[in-house]
Image (tube, grey):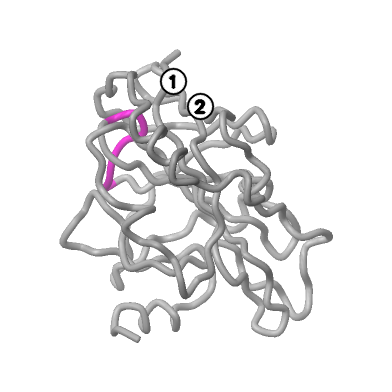
Amino acid sequence: MDESRQAVDHAPPGFRTRVDRAARTVLALVVLYWGLTLLGDQQPAGPPPQPGAAQAFGTEQAGAAARNHAQAPLPAADPVRVVIPQIKVDAPLMGLNLDDDGRLAAPPDSERNLAGWYQEGTSPGASGTAILGGHVDTAIGPAVFYALGSLNKGDTVQVPRTDGITAVFTVDAVEVYAADDFPDTKVYGPSTTPQLRLITCGGGYDKKAGRYLGNVVVYAHLTGRA
């Protein structure tokens, strides 16, 4: 196990991630704990939905998604909300920075309908890979990205911005990864086209450890503006 991975594995639970400070536009070397450790033996009333195999990238599908970038990039502008009609998400976004340990700080867990974006990276709609993350649940119940794993290819994600433009993204794939097999480059790697990643916890829940075993990742690309 390399040193950076080991450091993350021993990070406190919550919305945390190790970041490569040398590449400020890309999050890297990541094991994400974006659901809180629940109090005692508590667990949400029902497990969050997980993506099925049909929503994952296939070889041909991945190639088609990579070619499907007709929409010109937008200028950089801060996002203010994330709207996902298919799962009834309409939540404000707060900017997230790195703490002293190089981890992405969490939105307050008292705000269940609140997501965050990595504001030192790419703005949603601009060229590059923009990152949105949110809690899957808290000790008192489901949170903003609880249903993220139920999204399907072709669903849309809308991101209203401070410049009055709403960036519209189309989902290319939804995948789930174990924490010890997280594909950093695939998820966070740089792009010359406008890409979006939405990330939360998933992959099963370890009741004894009080944490999720992995992450759900939604891959999307810019297809319009409103």
Q: How would you rate the neighbour count of disc 2 (Cα within 10 Å): few for under 14, some for 14-19, many for 20 or more?
A: many
Q: Does residue 85 lie above or below 19 as drawn?
A: above
Q: Does residue 92 lie above or below 198 as drawn?
A: above
Q: Could you tell me residue 193's position as x and y percent? A: 27, 32
Residue drawn where x is 40% and y is 66% of the image: 17
For the N terminus, the quadrant is: bottom left
Q: Does the magenta stretch include residue 66?
A: no
Q: Which of marks 2 and 1 is nearer the N terminus?
A: 2
Q: Give the range drawn in magenta.
A: 120-126
Residue drawn where x is 45% and y is 36% of the image: 220
Q: Which disc, if any, is residue 214?
A: none
Q: In which quarter of the image is residue 206?
A: bottom right
Q: Quadrant of residue 122?
A: top left
Residue drawn where x is 39% and y is 62% of the image: 183
Local secondary structure at mark 2: strand
Q: Could you tell me residue 3's position as x and y percent? A: 29, 84
What secondary structure predominates along the stretch shown in magenta? loop
Which residue does the numbered mark 2 point to in the structure image? 158
Q: Could you tell me residue 78's position as x and y percent? A: 34, 32
Q: Residue type at mark 2?
A: Gln
Q: Do the residues labelled 2 and 1 touch (CB within 8 Å)?
A: yes
The residue closer to the viewer here, 13 or 195, is 195
Q: How would you rate the neighbour count of disc 1 (Cα within 10 Å): few for under 14, some for 14-19, many for 20 or more?
A: many
| Residue farthest to the front, as pictured | 60
Which residue does the numbered mark 1 point to in the structure image? 166
Residue 176 relative to residue 191: left or right: right
From mark 2 to mark 1, how far is it between C-alphas?
A: 6 Å
Report how many numbered discs are placed on residues in the image.
2
Q: Residue type at mark 1?
A: Thr
